[in-house]
Amino acid sequence: MSRAHIVASYDADLDQLVSAILEMGGQAETALAGALAALTERDNAAAARVIDDDARLDELEETVDQLAVRLFARRQPMAEDLRLIAMSLKISNDLERIGDYAASIAKRAKRLPPASTPRATASLRRMGERIQEMLADVLDAYDKRDARRAMTVWHRDAEVDDVYDSVFRELLAELQVDPRATSAGIDLLFIAKNLERIGDHTTNIAERLHYVVHGDRINRVRGDAPPPAESAPAAASD
């Protein structure tokens, strides 16, 4: 934590909350990596692990809820501590939803035939790798309370949206050329949308960390300069 409290157990409780969020983040990163392996390598074992492990994120979200409620009830937090605890509830929900979308990608990847729309799959890989980088960066920013780094992630969401639009057009063009690939193409369209939503939840986390550190909400258009260092979905489809 950034500062010590008079009651040492208070710091221990806050550290436990932060650790639970970081464990959720690690689990979400693993789920996304497994989903991308299922998609790009047709790794059905990886897909099965992502689907089976999704329950762990649900359990961790419940743990975060319980820790936050306990801190509210026992510690009467103020200022940054209050914001940290309140935002932990929202961040845990973002991470749980990332796991849901990863599981949805894994389920659809298992249904894809081996030779389905290879160009679109390559584009989805690039999109997924970009989102992986963003998720890793925002979790590191959360661990270090680095709002400036979080805002760098927030600005990158526009890149993901651009790639999503490109993949969407690419898939539609391929389906016009080969209507026999319609079933696989629909699955890939849903996968692209799920990846785009993972990017949205990643930038949500960046917004929430900015609020924890600075105490103000972001109300600007992406692409504006981030604030100086001193100064929050659709359901996943199976």
Image (tube, rainbow, N blue to C red):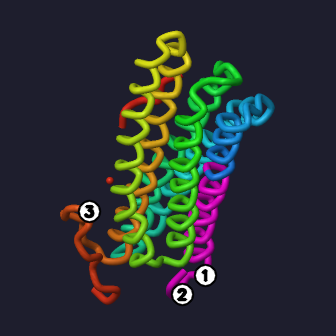
User: Which of disc 3 and disc 1 is earlier in sequence?
Assistant: 1
The C terminus is located in which quarter?
Answer: top right
Asked if 107 appears above or below 120 in the picture, the reply is above
Q: Is label 1 in contact with label 3 (beta carbons under 8 Å)?
A: no
Q: Determine whether the residue tagged by mark 2 lies in a helix, strand or loop.
A: loop
- State yes or no: residue 21 in magenta: yes
Residue 16 x/y as whole percent: 62, 65
Q: Main secondary structure of the magenta part?
A: helix
Q: Which residues are magenta?
A: 1-28
> Which residue, given by chain and number where applicable, does mark 3 sit on?
222
Between 68 and 134, the one nearer to me in the picture:
134
Res. 89 in view: no
**Residue at x 51%, y 72% (from the top left corner):** 141
Asked if 220 appears above or below 131 in the picture, the reply is below
Between 4 and 215, the one nearer to me in the picture:
215
Q: CA distance from mark 1 to mark 3?
A: 40 Å
The amino acid beneath tag 2 is Ala
Asked if 174 appears above or below 20 in the picture, the reply is above
> In the picture provided, is 27 more to the left or to the right than 70?
right
Q: CA distance from mark 1 to mark 2?
A: 7 Å
The amino acid beneath tag 1 is Ala
Asked if 53 appears above or below 222 in the picture, the reply is above
Q: What is the crowding at mark 2: few (fewer than 14 residues within 10 Å), some, or many (at least 20)?
A: few
> Which residue, given by chain and number where applicable, does mark 2 sit on?
4
Q: Is label 1 in contact with label 2 (beta carbons under 8 Å)?
A: yes
**Residue at x 53%, y 10% (from the top left corner):** 180
> Which residue, given by chain and number where applicable, does mark 1 sit on?
8
Q: What is the crowding at mark 1: few (fewer than 14 residues within 10 Å), some, or many (at least 20)?
A: few
User: Which of disc 2 and disc 3 is earlier in sequence?
Assistant: 2
The amino acid beneath tag 3 is Arg
Seen from this angle, which residue lies furthest front? 177
